[in-house]
Image (cartoon, coloured by chain):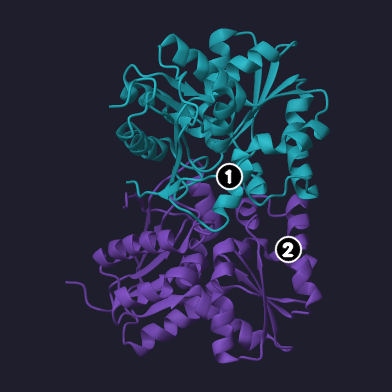
Chain colours: A cyan, B purple
Amino acid sequence: MTTNTQRPIGVFDSGVGGLTNVRALMERLPMENIVYFGDTARVPYGTKSRATIETFSMQIIDFLLEHDVKALVIACNTIAATAGSKIRQKAGGMPVLDVISAGAQAALDTTANNKIGIIATNTTVNSNAYARAIHSSNADTLVRTQAAPLLVPLVEEGWLDHEVTRLTVREYLKPLLVDGIDTLVLGCTHFPLLKPLISQEAPDITLVDSAITTAEATAKALASAGLLNTDNPSPDYRFYVSDIPLRFRTIGERFLGRSMEQIEMVALG
Amino acid sequence: MTTNTQRPIGVFDSGVGGLTNVRALMERLPMENIVYFGDTARVPYGTKSRATIETFSMQIIDFLLEHDVKALVIACNTIAATAGSKIRQKAGGMPVLDVISAGAQAALDTTANNKIGIIATNTTVNSNAYARAIHSSNADTLVRTQAAPLLVPLVEEGWLDHEVTRLTVREYLKPLLVDGIDTLVLGCTHFPLLKPLISQEAPDITLVDSAITTAEATAKALASAGLLNTDNPSPDYRFYVSDIPLRFRTIGERFLGRSMEQIEMVALG
């Protein structure tokens, strides 16, 4: 039987974007086994209703619990925003980390003028989850959110440095810059790939990439639960997806920053 | 029991785009009852694998057959391109119309120089279905296809006359214009909403909108099968979707061109 610390961390997302979290976890916690699930057959979630996202998320949690995970990382902002509390309920006492809690805390630690901007999907913006998370720590913070749905397909098209992407970013950032934010949370796993372009368009703004802060929060939570794996020099990484479309590996490896070996397709629902 | 001619036409799509076909059918066949299914919980299909699209399509057909449809209209180019033959097999002898067959025929009827361009989703382009359909009628036609995936989210964002959309259209059309096409098939149900902008960028090109030609083909097929409804002054329109996200009605009515009364959410799969 697998000992508690040897059990894998379960990381999940609506698609491939959550691989940026896997990458950050591999770097921060190089001894941990990881099981990833990406719902590529039903991606994107960011334009769907809360009820549908909850249903899909519960199916994913069932799948990961069958893989005997010791902790869960919600890598998708949209899932964290809409189904976070249902997931925590279902997970029992297991540590559950998510990109919104981690991103909100990192933004509060970063801002000097107490004005934070968020760009995210429609559903994440409509959920108001970032503002709630930030205001629960500091009610005086100005939080400005902006839905930026087109950035997802632009990243997937690979137009990371294209004039069309630049104009789109400029349009989305305009109201946030008018409000004088000094910190911008990249509230969707796709957006860190646009960091260079966003920095050019908003040179005075500090960008918060929640993949890194989520990995840090995961390390702390595992340590305090006595679940850190300290004896596993060749960790096991398993990638499960609900569809493997053309160019899947290419796009996936762009997010992960390394090759993906064990990819398996499974049907949910 | 419902007589044969009173049975509804089943129209389906991966999402809301197929409502442009419903609109064309309402105008061309104002006595017909229509049942529509849009798989809004799993949209878009255009970036998914053939196997997944086939599975999803078979679930939709089961649903429509339960509604006792007398004919099927595949309103989604991606479904027509990948699952068309499986659907025809499952439908038995029932008339099955699809946007690709109708669009290919209309393009052949339109072109003067025998050079046809197609813009569509990634999966439709990779299927090569338009070229196959056109070449089966005329092997000498030059067919140039271009994947234009970003136009789908741009339409859904409502940026129908935005500089970003204009630049994106210009980039996608460039290779087709270099090849000297005189006819362009709008090979995705979202694209007809960009007709004004595309016409400005390609003023000498004739645009083929397959919603209208598919409605025409449906009228012919029903007539020749003795299934035309000629006695139904108050037709029944039912809209089923697998998710009703925010702004669903707004976007849906933009495609349908009128209000949607009976919308119901159903779970598939």
- Element at badge 2? helix
Graded by Cα atoms within 10 Å as few (under 14), some (14 to 19) or many (20 or more), the crowding at tag 1 reads few
Task: Identify the residue under disc 2.
Answer: B172
- Please provide percent x and percent y for residue B148: 65, 61
- Of residue B98 and residue A96, the one placed in the foreground of this image is A96
- Element at badge 1? loop
> In the drawing, does residue A82 fall left or right of residue A66?
right
Chain that bears disc 2: B
Graded by Cα atoms within 10 Å as few (under 14), some (14 to 19) or many (20 or more), the crowding at tag 2 reads some
Chain that bears disc 1: A
Query: Does residue A140 appear anywhere in the picture?
Result: yes
Task: Identify the residue under disc 1.
Answer: A259
- Please provide percent x and percent y for residue A249: 56, 51
Query: Does residue A128 appear anywhere in the picture?
Result: no
Place residue B73 in its image quadrant.
bottom left
- Of residue A171 and residue A249, the one placed in the foreground of this image is A249
- Of residue B185 and residue B176, the one placed in the foreground of this image is B176
- Look at label 1 and name its amino acid: Ser
- Look at label 2 and name its amino acid: Tyr
